[in-house]
Amino acid sequence: MEVEDTGRTIPRRSLLRGAARGASAIITASAFGPTMSHLERRAAAQEATQVRLTGAPSSPEESRLLEQVLQDFEAKFLDITVLWEPVTQQYAEKLQTDLAAGTAADVFYVDSLLSPDLAARGVLLPLDEPMAGAGVRAEDFYAGLIEAFQWQDKTYGLPKDWSSLAMVYDPQAFDGAGIVAPPTTWDELRSVAQALFDATGQAPIILPPDFARFIVFLYQAGGAVIGNDGSVAIDSPETRQALDFYYGLYKDGLAATPADVGAQWPGDAFAKDLGVIVFEGNWMFPFLAASAPDKRFLIAELPAGPAGKVTMGFTVSYSINAKATVPESAWELVNYLTGPEGMARWTDLGLAMPSRPALAEAWIATYPEREPYLAGGAYARPWQLGPGGQAFFQDANAILEAVFAGQTESQDAVTQFAEKAVADIKIT
Amino acid sequence: MASLVATSRRNPIAAEDYLAGWVFVLPALVIFVGFIFGPILYAFWLSFHSWNVVTPEKPFVALDNYRNLVDSDDFRIALRNTIWYSAGVVPAQTATGLILAVLANRKIRGRTFFRTAFYFPSISSSVVISIIFLWLYANNGLINFVLGTLGLPTPRPPWLSNPRGVFQIAFDAFGIHDVSPWLVGPSVALVSIMLMNVWTTTGTMMVIFLAGLQDIPGDVYEAAAVDGATQWRMFRDITLPLLRPVTLFVVTLGLIGTLQVFDQIFVMSEGGPAKTTTTLAWLVYVEGFRKFSMGSASAIAVVLFIITLGLFLVHRRFLGLTGDQ
């Protein structure tokens, strides 16, 4: 009897959220009378809770596919319903204002670059306790991914999936220039680019003045933005070396920017045959399938730099709002979506790779041609620069743009990187 | 209030009108106070506080936000870009607006068509126009195609990706490379957006000038014609002086519009390349929503407000003088 009553009042509560919340609480209370304790009422209210989930799907397709996975979740957890609220534009700005207004969802996407800013300000729920309770260990995820969401020894999000960077190239162009194997080092990359340039007269590499690409070369040269001691370490000969190589490709005509060839971004240029080598992520597969389905392309691991192989781990977490109204249900959702079952279901759709190494084998069986992306898991570094990383990213891009326009010398740029890093990145 | 009481005692209908007046303006007043005046005051208050947007704490920092602006490279760059933008766009849109108005005021065939055609960009959404110009300015866009067909050089990097100053390009031709940041001039990217904005806003200015032209009595021109004045003399000595209040209005409107430029930047360049299209209004957005410092964003907004208010007061003064004459 009582359970049935609860069943009637609770969905009403979830439908008429907000204003009706107080009124329905009275209904619930009066239905059970004074015999029901606060804890019991709370338990009853938990029985059909609604979890609000928001995120920035990269395409309507991603949103639709996520809805399928959410249906599976609801089928498994009958007492939780999920309200999915996709945001297609200006997600970070919207999330910030929602947090400020106290209207942010219970569970939301957090980009790795933004994570420390939010974690340091205490708006994310630390997940260590629920993780321990559910037997989820940080080691279940790639270190280069979960580290992006750790701040001062606490975990503030679990990576929902990920993509590394790899070299995407046009095999026909390689054949035409007599190149038999993709380059594996910086020197080989330069000579391959030279051979391609000689064969066609076109800049083969599409290289953006974008710090999210340059940082790979910086790491490959053995450089760092923040050193091991936690201080800014970008003012180094390694940064200079990486910039000379990166910008050198452009200066010598072996690379062009997307804008130079009239494209939106490197993948767009590649799809339109305006370049034959780009350094992009797993998102190239769904993108090319949609925009250039007949295009032949292959992928290879990024060429290694002087300090060895490095790729970036681009990832987004499911994090829980520190003020979530239903933290237990929110955790169930996060744990399902990032758990072996939910993640396998999600990554099987091919948009991104599983962030759990244990799922890698099954995934690669489905998508064998994407092996180089997965191989990056062993040496991926998190795309994260500490609190203020978002601000530094903006400034660093402006510096790179000035370098590419021939306005700033390499050494001056290195100094400017350091000045901006000191000003923007708040190491507390 | 005293006069209201006095009036109502003498004439109850006047008091009723008075009340009705308030009732009718109430919706607009509520919106104005709640969504315009209130936020302005709040921004002013915030500019003396430090706020990271996501947490509620807003500690008082007195003048720190303003002091930081003095040392801020970004603020200097944005101020310089905004000044270039206004200094370029306002004279250009005023001059073109005036010329178009004079032409559209003649009794020529298809006059209505030209008036509508010139005004059309002003009533289109600035976002839509910005997106169209993104394509026009693309490396493989129409503008480069036309230039290429005519055998003219095209900028590399292309228009909106080119941070090189237009004066710097001229200096480079003479082998002068290191000039002060002011002499570098607005970047090719900023000039591209300025040109678009002139094209978009000229129509509005034309319409205002047209109204002004029609206020000039025809007999003044007739008298001048009897005295044997040429067309040019009539334009210089009758049209321009009599249009002076209108011109001042157009210039002020243009200044306010250009100081606030945001949507075109947001859609076309996001302040780049190399911050050369970062204007004050765009910097407010970046500080507030990308760098988590709403306090300094508010301080910039207040500075922008003071600049705009100062220009408005100058305008009032000029208009007052012309009114006396």
Image (tube, helix red, strand yellow):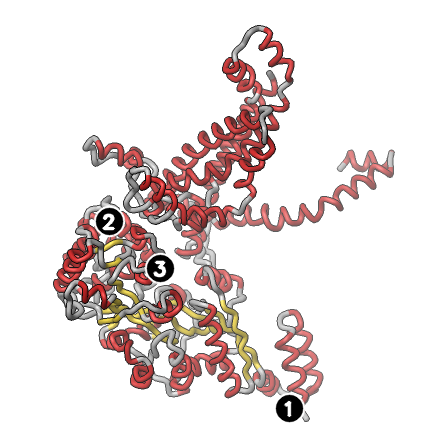
Q: Nearer the viewer, mark 1 or mark 2?
A: 2
Q: Secondary structure at mark 2?
A: helix
Inter-mark Cα distance, 1 to 2 = 68 Å
Q: Do callouts 2 and 3 point to residues on the same chain?
A: yes
Write the residue at 55% across / 7% down: B228
Q: Earlier in the sequence, mark 1 or mark 3?
A: 1
Q: Mark 2 = which residue? A: A403
Q: Position of residue B50 (x, y in %)?
A: 44, 53
Labelled pair 1, 3 in contact (Cβ < 8 Å): no
Q: Which mark is residue A3?
A: 1
The residue lying at 54 percent from left, 9 percent from top is B229
Which residue is disc 3 drawn over?
A390
Between residue B15 and residue B261, name the one nearer to us: B261
For residue B310, say whether it is visible: yes
Is B169 drawn above or below residue A2 in the view shown?
above
Crowd band around label 2 with a 10 angstrom C-alpha radius: few (<14), some (14–19), many (20+): many
- Measured along the vertical axis of the image, is residue B1 above or below residue A286? above
Q: In the picture shown, does residue B18 fall above or below A336? A: above
- The quadrant where residue A307 appears: bottom left
Dot 3: element: helix
Please give the name of the residue rendered at 21% of the width and 50% of the height, measured from the top-left corner: A415
Q: Kindly identify which chain the residue marked by label 2 belongs to.
A: A
Mark 2 or mark 3: which comes first in sequence? 3
Secondary structure at numbered mark 1? helix
Parent chain of label 3: A
Residue A230 appears left or right of B65: left
